[in-house]
Image (cartoon, rainbow, N blue to C red):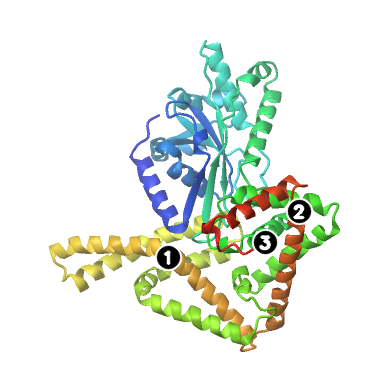
């Protein structure tokens, strides 16, 4: 099935949208991706609605094009069918229980040596762990191998497990990790499939689920996940402004270690609860850990708070003239994005809504900006038209590429102001000043308990040893000088 113009257009739009919303999409394990001529089935996690296929299509290694499943009822309209076929979408007939008929279009694609991407969880979700896997991916892979065996062909389509990890999936300028696992070849399960198809499919699904668990971050509940997140922030304080290089193994090790140790060590159980309390208090006060960690005194003082606010304000004011034009032009996008995230109750939909609304506004904003540049700066001449196109392109590129640091500075400034407002001016309800001072004490206690935990269990617990190994590696790496947690 050839890909047409619509596929390239959709990918171009997706690439632009992802580039403007996320700060980085990091690929890991690309060496596991099969060769460009080999057919295979991509089985990926599904945490972020339409952004998941967009990320896969835009970032897949070797620019490999991917087909996706869709219900065959979506192809009833001839115009929709033409568009979907042009984009490489594969129809699936869910009304039949005959696997050969159910996946007929999928097999046609695989016979051409192409790749099909599916989401075994079925629907997008916001859970601290993987959702229940369905068996459709396994049936498709095994049935394809069976058909080829019956025709005398010694070939199949391996399943490539992929974990798409969003540390803050609905946040603007956040990061995404796409991690590829080792392909799962189905030949060993084919004899069982010929005897008992359902049992073989269940076994393959279990293998796939286990493989994807190793590629992602999974916790038994949100309390366990929040405690591990907070522990990671406190252990690696200099790396909050960008994703730590070993985010997945570090976070998963902290989840495993604290859950396991809490069952036999009451102090670890108390530490987990304290870390969750600290995280929830930070969110309640609209503060970040970095803003609390800034103060080395035992208590946050009025003098230190005032000086820090003045420093941050001066830095932002000096930088403002360079950033102000882009900020003013894109302000409607930021306002609409904020409202879209605020009123959407399902987190897996928020990023998608922000991007869609932004894409709807961008043409109007850039058209108005282009007209203004053309007539106000270049007098509406023909040469001015060319210069306006170039100027607008540079303007957009500069804004997007420079926004990360300035966006972090702006959020940090808001946090500094909230501290100043509570600690110095003494304003605010619900004992804000007292809560902030107590928060500083709670942070100090949590750091001390974390240090005791890693020192006590290093060498005795594999997950703790993994964490301490990362800390020691940073201690000897000059690039990690911001990490102040010393064993």
Q: Is residue 307 at least partly visible in the picture?
A: yes
Q: Secondary structure at mark 1?
A: helix
Q: Is residue 71 at least partly visible in the picture?
A: no
**Name of the residue lying farthest toward the top:** 152
Q: Position of residue 260 (x, y in %)?
A: 79, 49
Q: Determine whether label 3 and label 1 are within 8 Å by CB.
A: no
According to the image, label 2 marks what residue?
Answer: 258
Mark 2 vs mark 3, CA separation in Å:
12 Å
Q: Position of residue 308 (x, y in %)?
A: 54, 80
Q: Determine whether label 2 and label 3 are within 8 Å by CB.
A: no
Counting the numbered discs, the total is 3
Q: Say which quadrant the C terminus sits in.
A: bottom right
According to the image, label 1 marks what residue?
Answer: 403
Q: Is residue 135 above or below residue 100?
A: below
Q: Position of residue 345 (x, y in %)?
A: 61, 61
According to the image, label 3 marks what residue?
Answer: 230
Mark 2 Cα-neighbour bin, 10 Å: few <14, some 14–19, many ≥20: many
Please tell me whether mark 3 or mark 1 is closer to you in this view.
3
Disc nearer the start of the sequence (2/3): 3
């Amino acid at each position: 099935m050839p890909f047409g113009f619509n596929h390239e257009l959709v990918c171009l739009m997706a690439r632009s949208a992802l580039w403007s919303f996320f700060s980085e999409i990091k690929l890991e394990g690309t060496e596991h991706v099969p060769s460009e001529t080999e057919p295979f089935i991509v089985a990926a996690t599904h945490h972020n609605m339409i952004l998941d296929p967009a990320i896969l299509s835009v970032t897949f290694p070797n620019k490999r094009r991917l087909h996706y499943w869709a219900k065959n009822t979506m192809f009833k309209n001839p115009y929709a069918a033409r568009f979907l076929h042009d984009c490489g979408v594969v129809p699936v007939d869910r009304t039949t229980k005959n696997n050969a008929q159910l996946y007929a279009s999928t097999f046609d694609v695989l016979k051409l040596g192409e790749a099909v991407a599916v989401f075994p969880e079925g629907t997008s979700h916001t859970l601290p762990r993987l959702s229940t896997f369905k068996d459709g991916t396994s049936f498709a892979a095994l049935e394809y191998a069976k058909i080829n065996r019956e025709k005398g062909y010694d070939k199949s389509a391996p399943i490539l497990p992929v974990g798409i990890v969003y540390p803050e999936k609905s946040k603007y300028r956040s990061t995404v990790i796409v991690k590829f696992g080792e392909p799962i070849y189905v030949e060993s399960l084919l004899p069982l499939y010929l005897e008992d198809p359902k049992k073989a499919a269940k076994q393959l699904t279990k293998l796939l689920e286990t493989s994807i668990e190793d590629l992602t971050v999974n916790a038994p509940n949100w309390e366990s996940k929040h405690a591990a997140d907070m522990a990671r922030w406190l252990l690696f304080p200099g790396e909050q402004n960008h994703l730590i290089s070993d985010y997945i193994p570090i976070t998963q090790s902290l989840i495993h270690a604290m859950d396991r140790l809490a069952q036999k060590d009451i102090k670890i159980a108390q530490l987990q609860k304290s870390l969750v309390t600290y995280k929830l208090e930070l969110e309640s006060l609209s503060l970040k850990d970095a803003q609390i960690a800034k103060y080395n005194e035992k208590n946050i003082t009025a003098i230190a708070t005032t000086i820090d606010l003045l420093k941050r304000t001066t830095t932002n004011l000096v930088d403002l003239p360079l950033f102000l034009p882009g900020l003013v032009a894109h302000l409607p996008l930021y306002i609409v994005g904020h409202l879209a995230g605020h009123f959407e109750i399902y987190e897996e939909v928020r990023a998608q809504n922000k991007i869609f609304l932004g894409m709807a506004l961008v043409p109007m904003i850039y058209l108005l900006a282009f007209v203004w540049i053309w007539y106000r700066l270049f007098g509406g001449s023909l040469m001015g038209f060319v210069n306006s196109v170039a100027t607008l392109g540079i303007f957009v590129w500069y804004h997007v590429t420079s926004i990360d640091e300035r966006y972090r500075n702006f959020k940090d400034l808001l946090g500094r102001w909230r501290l100043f407002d509570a600690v110095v001016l003494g304003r605010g309800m619900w004992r804000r000043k007292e809560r902030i001072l107590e928060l500083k004490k709670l942070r100090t206690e949590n750091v001390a308990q974390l240090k005791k935990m890693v020192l006590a269990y290093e060498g005795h617990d594999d997950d703790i040893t993994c964490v301490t190994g990362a800390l020691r590696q940073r201690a000897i790496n000059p690039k990690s000088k911001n990490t102040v947690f010393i064993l």
